[in-house]
């Protein structure tokens, strides 16, 4: 992002962001979003490439065939060829993705990574919220519709998706997909999606088992590639192909077994029958033929999904894991490299299954021990979820429970959606019920799933059971309880409670967890408490917490937590009126967000809001609105953010001359407050903004009443004093204004929300002028001008309106410097005053149903399609649409969309 | 696929082209909560499953 040239050039200081050091955990996302590496020795199969080429000319290509038929390999090699019609977005699914929010978040991440979405594309600002795919999907569709190239979205292992909501979402996507989308679904069996319609309309292509089966020449190629030279006669190849029915895994295993066979012909004629027996036969054959050392290696390492050299060493007790894996990949394709990083590998899923089967048969006693070792390895590296999964597989219940209790805090605070609850549920039920810590984790799971009420109802019971625990565990329990309370209060938007419970958690953390594994939890607690302090107006304490959180996150290499702290610090400076500082941190946060595909994450919202304020002060209203929209998209649903945004939006509307609209925005914000008490400072800010707008609209409230109201809940802060003084001026009480302002002018008193010194001096200048103290007025104006010019704070003068304009004109000769800037302000202020209210106006509020329909209007869907999507009749949709048009004062859909966007209804 | 009902049972008749297709079909029958009574190959390029 570049600051407009009219402003002094700024060079944002770049803060160091460390890359995550975790070997597997931090990058799991990456391996899900990258196709497996393709082997160089792969057989080229142009006929299948042709099928995919043709298929991706239109909407859907279904690749449906059983395990081991080479679906993934085919798609990976096609994706990395030059043949796809556009960038390829890859997503490898697994059973953990049966959660609509997570599924669509991955889809978005895959699309954004593919290179098809421009930096400012709408898709980058999208964020699926739990339980709202109905409103999310139209946005996804319209985001796809604005892409300039086709994009191929590959969903591999779709058979693992069984969740009805996710599948329904896919169905909607298929029904409304714009022409840019080319979907490729790879699955072991036909998905429950309405294929018939697509097939009839010619928008479905299929690649099935019969297509994937190796032909005799392809089988010959594959065998020759593996052996380096053909060792089978044509007849033998044909026989092998017939026996395996061209099954890729079977042929691959056969090739392995053939290595060093004294009599290949005899081997080929020996095995018979169906897939299962081929697999068994060949696995036995392949394994038996390996040197003992390699065989042991394979059997011992097959129990984990992803391997590194070090993990392999832990499992085998050897030291050459790394070179062994590299050799296995190079020599015979037992393993494939995953992700773009160096040293992670996995077995072909089918081969891993066979190996595990073999291990259980051959050495059942070893299985538990191996899982236990893997658990230990993961735990030592902070890869908690993997560790717990392995401990569960080892049926080491107490160990798994201990891991969960120890790492519960970071899992809860990280909001790692479904995971923790799923893990707890896999423990024996009686164990969970008897253990207060695990019971508490059960409550935490409810919070994570966005059901804070159920969790809150449960919490009072938990502490009573804590007496059952040993002393050491009692401390840990107290910590867990404090963390759960913090997370719960955060979700409910009860910031005071976040501060209380969070401080308690921080105190307990420094007492209980000292082994470094807890850095994660500490960084998250710090940033949570810091953010709560920020929104509650305790800016100094918040700054300390956020900076410490940033330091902990830096030290521990926790990228997302660093980002969260950056983003919140940006907002903190904006709220303090330190515009330059807010710009530096905010820009930094936005860049990190773009690099890491976090642009639509919750953590990005404060950074966007900070930049929105910065641009507001710089009087770049377009950029300010743009960032406000991004903050809304990523921070939606969290009440303090919603209210903070409403205040900014109201100021933006007023700056554009839409006073009625701005009052409306605040009235709506007021109405939405039901059931939630905002923190004091935020509430006071709302009251003052509202009073300011009313005064501008000619319906002032008595300032003394407002002041009394404010002082009841605590002393005035600097920003509040400036706002109040402005009201007093408008009321014709310059002496009162000067008195209100006095204590704060030289940096005395708490700064508080949006204390911009330039504004304070400007108000003082207007007051002094009214009191006929012209020398003071000139000095104060001079200071205000120099501060505003230095910081580029044009808006501060424009918002002050006619009194400021008159002051500038009359004192021009008395202010020794900055004439050019003064003239620029005068002109801008005069122009702003001339802005006739031509901006669109909302004649009447939209109903909730009309809002729903409005969200569909930007898409390419017809009214009929909208109706079927909403399960209502066509006439109903039309009625709503005409209602929207009337209220927006427009005559058509396109115009309605534009006008709704300007009114921030979209 | 055609459906023939009667006698408290429903027969679904139609071509099942391969394993993936068959598994997909069986999953759907399961998802609908229907009890699968049996499956019979029929003469010609069609197959049927009876559900109750």
Image (spheres, rainbow, N blue to C red):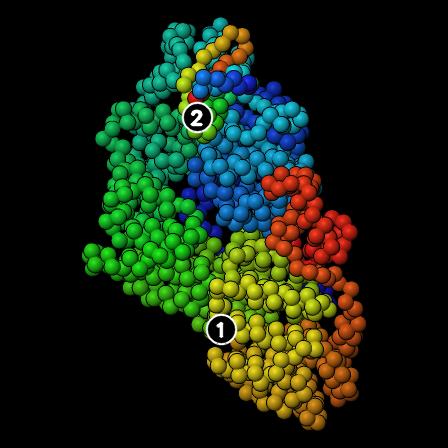
> x and y percent of residue A444 in the render?
36, 53
- Could you tell me if residue A343 is visible in this image? no
Can residue A370 be seen here? The reply is yes
- Which residue appears at 52% of the width and 80% of the height? A710
Can you tell which quarter of the image residue A262 is in? top left
Residue A402 location (% of width, % of height): 27, 49
Single out the mark in the foreground, 1 or 2. 2
Chain to which mark 1 belongs: A
**Residue depicted at x 53% and y 53%:** A601
Residue A201 lies, with reference to residue A648, above or below; the image says above
Q: Are marks 1 and 2 in contact (CB under 8 Å)?
A: no
Disc 2 target residue? B34
Question: On the picture, is A521 further left or further right than A898?
Answer: left
- Most foreground residue, A493 or A269: A493
Q: Quadrant of the N terminus of chain A?
A: bottom right
> Foreground residue, A387 or A408?
A408
* Residue A153 pos. (x, y %): 58, 36
Residue A78 falls left or right of residue A529: right
Where is residue A537? Give x, y as percent.
49, 72
Q: Nearer the viewer, residue A755 or A354?
A: A755
Q: Which residue is mark 1?
A: A680
Label 2: element kind: loop
Rendered position, A116 above or below A353: below
């Amino acid at each position: 992002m570049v600051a407009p040239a009219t402003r002094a050039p700024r060079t944002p200081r770049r803060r160091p962001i460390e890359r995550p050091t975790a070997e597997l955990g931090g990058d799991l996302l990456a391996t899900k979003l990258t196709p497996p590496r393709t082997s160089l020795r792969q057989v080229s199969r142009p006929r299948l490439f042709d099928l995919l080429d043709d298929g991706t000319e239109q909407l859907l290509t279904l690749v449906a065939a059983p395990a081991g038929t080479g679906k993934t390999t085919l798609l990976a090699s096609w994706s990395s060829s030059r043949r796809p019609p556009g960038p390829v977005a890859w997503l490898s699914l697994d059973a953990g993705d049966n959660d609509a929010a997570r599924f669509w978040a991955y889809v978005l991440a895959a699309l954004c990574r593919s290179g098809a979405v421009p930096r400012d594309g709408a898709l980058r600002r999208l964020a699926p919220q739990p339980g709202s795919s109905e409103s999310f999907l139209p946005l996804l569709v319209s985001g796809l519709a604005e892409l300039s190239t086709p994009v191929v979205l590959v969903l591999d292992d779709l058979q693992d998706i069984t969740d009805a909501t996710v599948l329904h979402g896919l169905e909607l996507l298929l029904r409304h997909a714009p022409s840019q989308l080319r979907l490729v679904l790879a699955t072991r069996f036909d998905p429950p999606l309405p294929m018939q319609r697509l097939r009839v309309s010619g928008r479905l292509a299929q690649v099935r088992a019969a297509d994937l089966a190796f032909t005799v020449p392809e089988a010959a190629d594959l065998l020759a590639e593996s052996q380096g030279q053909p060792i089978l006669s044509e007849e033998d190849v044909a026989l092998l192909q017939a026996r395996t029915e061209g099954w890729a895994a079977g042929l691959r295993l056969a090739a392995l077994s053939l290595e060093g066979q004294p009599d290949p012909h005899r081997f080929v004629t020996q095995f018979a029958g169906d897939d299962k027996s081929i697999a068994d036969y060949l696995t036995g054959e392949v394994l038996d033929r390996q040197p003992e050392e390699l065989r042991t290696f394979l059997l011992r390492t097959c129990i984990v999904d992803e391997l590194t050299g070090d993990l392999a060493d832990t499992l085998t007790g050897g030291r050459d894991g790394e070179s062994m894996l590299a050799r296995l990949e190079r020599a015979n394709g037992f393993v494939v490299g995953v992700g773009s990083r160096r040293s992670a590998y996995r077995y072909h899923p089918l081969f891993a299954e066979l190996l595990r089967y073999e291990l259980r048969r051959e050495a059942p006693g070893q299985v538990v021990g191996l899982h236990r070792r893997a658990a230990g390895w993961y735990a030592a590296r902070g890869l908690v979820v993997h560790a717990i999964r392995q401990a569960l597989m080892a049926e080491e219940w107490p160990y798994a429970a201990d891991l969960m209790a120890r790492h519960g805090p970071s899992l809860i605070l990280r909001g790692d959606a479904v995971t923790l609850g799923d893990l707890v549920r896999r423990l024996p039920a009686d164990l969970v019920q008897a253990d207060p810590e695990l019971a508490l984790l059960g409550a935490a799971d409810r919070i994570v799933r966005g059901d804070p009420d159920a969790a809150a109802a449960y919490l009072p019971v938990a502490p009573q059971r804590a007496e059952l625990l040993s002393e050491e565990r009692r401390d840990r329990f107290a910590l867990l309880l404090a963390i759960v309370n913090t997370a719960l209060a955060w979700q409910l938007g009860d910031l005071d409670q976040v501060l209380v419970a969070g401080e308690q958690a921080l105190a307990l953390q420094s007492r209980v967890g000292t082994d470094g594994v807890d850095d994660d939890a500490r960084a998250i607690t710090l940033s949570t408490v810091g953010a709560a302090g920020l929104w509650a107006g305790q800016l100094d304490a918040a700054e300390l917490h956020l900076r410490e959180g940033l330091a902990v996150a830096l030290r521990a290499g926790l990228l997302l937590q660093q980002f969260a702290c950056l983003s919140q610090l940006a907002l903190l400076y904006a709220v303090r009126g330190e515009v330059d500082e807010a710009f530096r941190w905010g820009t930094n946060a936005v860049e990190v967000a773009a690099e890491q595909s976090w642009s639509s994450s919750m953590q990005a919202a404060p950074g966007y809001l900070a930049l929105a304020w910065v641009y507001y002060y710089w009087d770049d209203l377009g950029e300010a609105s743009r960032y406000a929209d991004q903050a809304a998209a990523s921070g939606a649903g969290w009440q303090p953010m919603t209210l903070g945004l409403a205040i900014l939006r109201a100021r933006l509307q007023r700056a554009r001359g839409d006073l009625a609209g701005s009052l409306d925005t605040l009235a709506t914000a007021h109405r939405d407050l039901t059931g939630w008490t905002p923190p004091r400072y935020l509430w006071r800010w709302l009251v003052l903004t509202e009073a300011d707008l009313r005064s501008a609209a000619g319906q002032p409230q008595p300032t003394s009443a407002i002041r009394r109201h404010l002082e009841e809940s605590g002393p005035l802060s600097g920003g509040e004093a400036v706002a109040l003084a402005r009201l007093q001026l408008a009321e014709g009480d310059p002496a009162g204004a000067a008195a209100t302002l006095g204590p704060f002018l030289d940096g005395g008193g708490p700064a508080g929300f949006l204390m911009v010194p330039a504004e304070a001096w400007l108000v003082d200048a207007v007051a002094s002028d009214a009191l006929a103290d012209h020398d003071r007025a000139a000095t104060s104006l001079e200071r205000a001008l120099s501060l505003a010019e230095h910081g580029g704070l044009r808006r501060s003068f424009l918002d002050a309106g006619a009194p400021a304009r008159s002051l500038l004109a009359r004192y021009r000769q008395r202010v020794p410097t900055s004439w050019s800037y003064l003239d620029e302000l005068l002109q801008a202020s005069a122009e702003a005053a001339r802005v006739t209210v031509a901006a669109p106006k909302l004649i009447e509020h939209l109903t909730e149903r009309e809002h729903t329909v409005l969200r569909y209007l930007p898409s390419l869907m017809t009214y009929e399609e909208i109706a079927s999507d909403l399960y209502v009749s066509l006439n109903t949709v039309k009625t709503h649409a005409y209602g929207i048009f009337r209220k927006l004062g427009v005559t058509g859909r396109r115009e309605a969309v534009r006008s709704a966007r300007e009114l921030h209804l979209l | 696929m055609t459906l023939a009902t009667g006698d408290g049972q429903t027969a679904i008749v139609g071509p099942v082209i391969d394993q993936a297709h068959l598994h997909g079909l069986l999953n759907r029958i399961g998802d609908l909560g229907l009890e699968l009574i049996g499956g019979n190959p029929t003469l010609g390029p069609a197959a049927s499953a009876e559900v109750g």
